Image (cartoon, grey):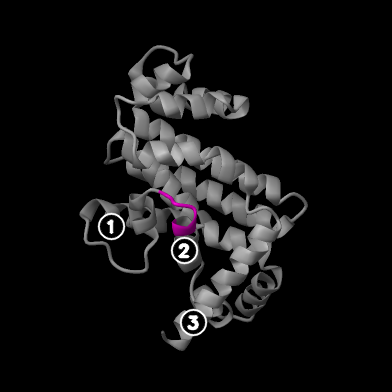
Amino acid sequence: MSEKSQKLEQTFERLLQAAQSRGELPSFSQRARSIIVSLTEGDEDNDTQLVQAILSDATLTQRVLRLANSAMYAMFGGQVSTVSRAVQVLGLHAVAHLALGLKMLDAITAEAQGQQETYLALQDSVAAGYIGREIASLSAPLKDSEVASVCAILHSLGRVLVSLYLTKEYQNIQRKQSEGVALSEACESVLGGSYTDLAWRMAQHWGMPPNIVASLSPEDAANGHTQWLRQVARSATEFSQA
């Protein structure tokens, strides 16, 4: 293992330790598991587990229904008033990725109370998710738009988690940037790698669906669809930061 890789692994271990000492985003860890399972093991004909996972969270239910009735999905016609109907109209995977993205953002927002830097980073993550969905919707099926949204959110997650759990390192990176150092160089100097490298490791640690994990990998994807997700997520992240 190279010195750079070793430093990055050490940074990730410290990130995990800091997250675990504060509960490791407990609301995400507990409530999103069944959603992840529905993405990795479920199919369009077996959506009971996903529906129950969403219905167990009243706020998530309301937000899924609100988004299912938004302008983006108006093409389907008729009001979506139940989660089961949302799954029928939008598809299991679209609803699952939508719910997963919302749970991630909710969990991080709850952890980030009072931490202004994390809120600012989180705003970029939310914007990236929205932009990723919009970019993908121009040329891809509906379910891929939600996958792209989650990938874009996770692409920014490394920055959010470092600002939340490794405050000194985050401030050091910001200081270097203010001195004219490029973000990539500053991250490599302080963390041993990029924010996305850390997000990739965290996605693996959380057991995220393989296509999402692969879209964050530092290695080029052999699968064309995964490579497309990766490019959309990168573009959305760059747009959100701009």
**Image quadrant assignment for residue 168:** bottom right
> What amino acid type should be assigned to the residue bearing mark 2?
Arg
Q: Residue furthest top?
A: 78
Residue that badge 2 annotates: 201
The nearer-to-camera label among 2 and 1 is 2
Q: Which residues are magenta?
A: 204-208
Question: Regarding mark 2 in the picture, which secondary structure is present there?
Answer: helix
Residue 137 visible, this angle: no
Query: What is the spatial separation of the Cα atoms under label 2 and label 1, in whole angstroms?
Result: 18 Å
First reached walking from the N terminus: tag 2 or tag 1: 2
Tag 3 secondary structure: helix
Q: Earlier in the sequence, mark 3 or mark 2?
A: 3
Q: Amino acid at mark 3?
A: Gln
Q: Quadrant of the N terminus?
A: bottom left
Kindly report the distance in space between the C-alpha atoms of the residues bearing marks 1 and 3.
Answer: 26 Å
Q: Residue at x 22, y 61 (%)?
A: 222
Q: Which residue is mark 1?
A: 227
